[in-house]
Amino acid sequence: QQQVKQSPQSLIVQKGGISIINCAYENTAFDYFPWYQQFPGKGPALLIAIRPDVSEKKEGRFTISFNKSAKQFSLHIMDSQPGDSATYFCAASGGTGGFKTIFGAGTRLFVKA
Amino acid sequence: DAGVIQSPRHEVTEMGQEVTLRCKPISGHNSLFWYRQTMMRGLELLIYFNNNVPIDDSGMPEDRFSAKMPNASFSTLKIQPSEPRDSAVYFCASINHGAGDTQYFGPGTRLTVL
């Protein structure tokens, strides 16, 4: 019930391409779905987040698509750049868990120049 | 703002020794989280505090681990005695409930237990 399943584990994309990372959750009480970006040697940092009352949120080249009925959400990175190479984590929180955040396993993205 | 501060950044110790990791959350933040990150298990929540009170410690692996938050600006995670399987990167994160749900992570402490 508390899991967040993330795929793929790793992703290689050409510069300028679209990177897509998918996540699925089980707990319908979750009400906050952030994506974090982590560079080597650094802590995760919030990239973009969405609440279940909207189906899409876009910030620059980054878009979250949210499907409440399927309990799935995804991150799309348009015009992927080598500087986007990092590990991306989806996460979920809310409901009876309060601010306890459940993280996906992470996706290592490499953008080839 | 200096962000979340963790110390030390790197710690190498021998099995059986006591290890203390320290965290200073962002001023004004009212919840603090301790995570452990490994290749095998990913990012695991160990414990979190709200207004200095431990709320959920279900992720603490065993009695060798303990965490305290004596005041709003300081927390410690202690491992006694340490074991090689405790080797990981430990992150501290803080959040301001009144300003949204974003967790701000520190730079982490890389712990190696020999």
Image: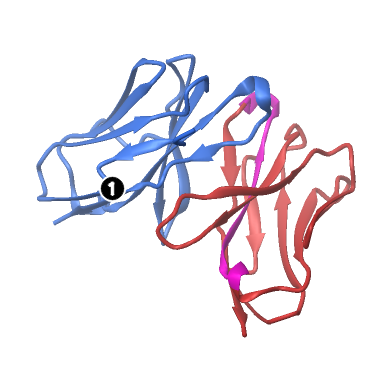
Chain colours: A red, B blue
* Residue depicted at x 13% and y 56%: B114
Residue B101 rendering spot, x and y as whole percentages: 65, 31
Q: Which residue is mark 1?
A: B9
**Label 1 neighbour load within 10 Å: few <14, some 14-19, many 20+:** some
Quick check: can you spot residue A80?
A: yes
Q: Is residue B84 left or right of residue B55?
A: left
Q: Nearer the viewer, residue A97 or A58?
A: A58
State whether residue A21 is above or below residue A89.
below
Residue at (64% x, 55% y) in the render: A5
Image: B2 above or below A16 = above
* Residue positioned 40% across, 47% down in the render: B107
Magenta range: A83-98
As drawn, A92 above or below B30: below
Q: Residue furthest front?
A: B1
Q: Secondary structure at mark 1?
A: loop
Residue A20 x %, y %: 74, 68
Viewer-nearest residue: A24 or A92: A92
Q: Quadrant of residue A28?
A: top right
State left or right for residue A20 relative to residue A37: right
User: Was residue A93 drawn as part of the magenta stretch in this picture?
Assistant: yes
Image coordinates of residue A67 in percent, x first then y, are 86, 50
